[in-house]
Amino acid sequence: MKIAEAQKIVDEWINSVGIRYYNELTNTAILTEEVGEVARLMARMYGEQSFKTKEAEATAPQDLADEMADVLFVLICLANQTGIDLSEALIKNLEKKTKRDRDRHANNEKLRNED
């Protein structure tokens, strides 16, 4: 699925099933909450934090995928609400990063060591 398609599908879903968009501030708060849920799983699945006993049994990689999809969904909602074409924004962002970071990352000793 292309990003533009995702933006259209989310818009259609919101306007039919979801009735309407939450306001931008509410969606920003929801985005923050969803990012926190991804961070919580990452800290436990890949970091040094551990799950509670019953929680570990209930948590699987598909839970992380679902939480990441929640983040993407709300981000797309915000882009739609604010008139941002995420495809265009990502292309411009990659161009900016390429120009800014080309030498910076190549010369970063920390990136050469995989410790």
Image: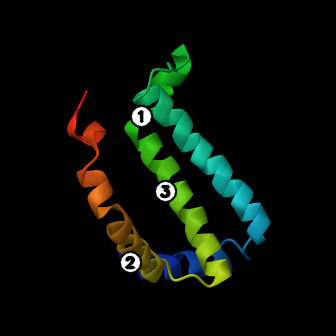
In primary-sequence order, the first of circles 3 and 2 is 3
Amino acid type of the residue that numbered disc 1 sits on in the rendered structure: Ala
Q: Position of residue 55 (x, y in %)?
A: 54, 23
- Residue 76 falls in image quadrant: bottom right
In front: label 3 or label 1: 3
* Image depth: mark 3 or mark 2 in front: 2
Location of residue 34 in the rendering, given as x and y in whole percent from the top left corner: 61, 49
Residue 96: which quarter of the image? bottom left
Residue 32 in the image, given as x and y percentages of width and height: 66, 51
Q: Is residue 8 above or below residue 30?
A: below
Question: In the structure shown, which secondary structural element does the residue marked by tag 2 occupy?
Answer: helix
Which image quadrant is residue 16 in? bottom right
For marks 3 and 1, the one nearer the N-term is 1
Residue visible at 51% across and 83% down in the picture: 85
Reading the image, the residue beneath label 1 is 60
Towards the viewer: 111 or 33: 111
Of 2 and 102, nearer the camera is 102
Q: Secondary structure at mark 1?
A: loop
The residue labelled by disc 2 is 91
In the drawing, does residue 77 fall left or right of residue 38?
A: right
Q: Quadrant of the N terminus?
A: bottom left
